[in-house]
Image: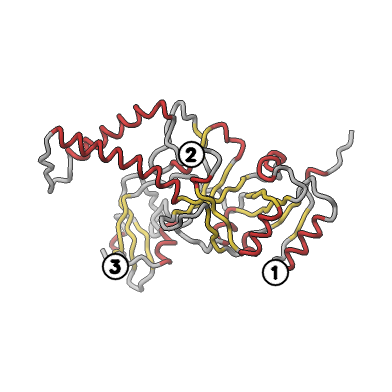
Amino acid sequence: MTKRLSLELRRMAFESHDACVSCGYAFNKGDTSHLGYGNDDEPLYVCDKCAKLLKETAIRHYFMPRPYILPVPNSKLWRYMDFTKYVSLLASRGLYFTSADSFEDNYEGAKGLKNHKEKWDSHFLEFFRSAIKNPPPEYKHGLSEVEVENQASKLLADLELVGMANKQSTFISCWHESEHESEAMWRLYSSFLANAVAVRTTYESLYQSLGRDPSIYIGRVQYIDLKKSYASVNDAFWRKRKSFEHEREVRAVVHDLDCKEQGKVLTCDLDQLIEEVFVSPKAPAWFAELVTDVNKKYGVQVAVSTSELIEEPFF
């Protein structure tokens, strides 16, 4: 294997994650996916059956399903924010990703409830013991029971340290998925301020605006009952408690071991990202004009609309 992973190949593997690009075979957990290049150096992401099409094998992967669900391409996503954050978005021409360690929810990235940790530890200790005692055929562990136990305990401790470190190296941009404007989201994420806006986009536009970057993962959060289950090692940042289910969150996630700040800005194409801007239902009449003027100043041509929530009822 050459380990030559071009951007085009990484994009193909990312976008076609679930199936072979040649025959359409749907991968199952544990299958081998092959990444490489064909006779004309075209990128290929294929199954065992189609691996013969590869002139060069870059790498093989043990297939694992995504830890999140992809929204449909045209699903509407909303980001509610105060006006200063909106201006920052325009001025930086970038999307701000917050460190998971900075979120108010201290369960961000958690695997489960502390009073259930003993059961979690027991499961992984047994998993590590089995892995140590049953290496591939060409290896023999030759370890005593005490040595096996010590190694398993060390791996468990390392797993917990990695979990804590991941909170500092994981950065998230949160969006609300809905066909319609949300009164609850105005209250939660803009404090119902008069000088607040909501940016509307779609999943596809968000993905495209970030340059189809295969290192940025975008998907739906799943809400679980931590009294009955755990988040796994790979999906901890894609699981939240049931009490947050009203958020209907879609998040973009990126990992950066080198960034030590509380957040980072990733360049994005604002013309691709912003499909429409809505002003707060508490905003005065002139505020929409101000937002329009600021958009023009930063070269963003997008519709600015008043909130649907100010429509008058009849009885």
Dot 3 or dot 2, earlier in sequence? 3
Mark 1 or mark 3, earlier in chain: 3
Q: Indicate left or right for 145 with 174 as reference.
A: left
Q: Is residue 29 left or right of residue 280?
A: left
Q: Which residue is mark 3?
A: 56
Name the residue: 71% across, 54% down.
83
- Crowding around mark 1 (Cα neighbors within 10 Å: few <14, some 14 to 19, many 20+) is few
Residue at the (81%, 59%) spot, across then down = 289
- Foreground: disc 1 or disc 3: 1
**Mark 2 or mark 1: which comes first in sequence?**
2
Spatial CA distance of label 1 from label 3 is: 45 Å
| Amino acid marked by disc 3 | Glu
Is 302 placed left or right of 145 in the picture? Answer: right
Q: Which quadrant of the view contains residue 92?
A: bottom right
Instruction: State the mark number for residue 299.
Output: 1
Residue 15 visible somewhere in the drawing: no
Q: Identify the mark at residue 133; answer none if there is no mark.
A: none
- Inspect the image, locate mark 1, and give the three-letter code of the amino acid beneath it: Gly
Mark 3, other Cα within 10 Å: few <14 / some 14–19 / many ≥20 = many
Q: Give the labeled residue for mark 2.
A: 239
Distance CA(mark 3)–CA(mark 2): 38 Å
Give how far across and how far down residue 190 sits, in percent. 69, 45
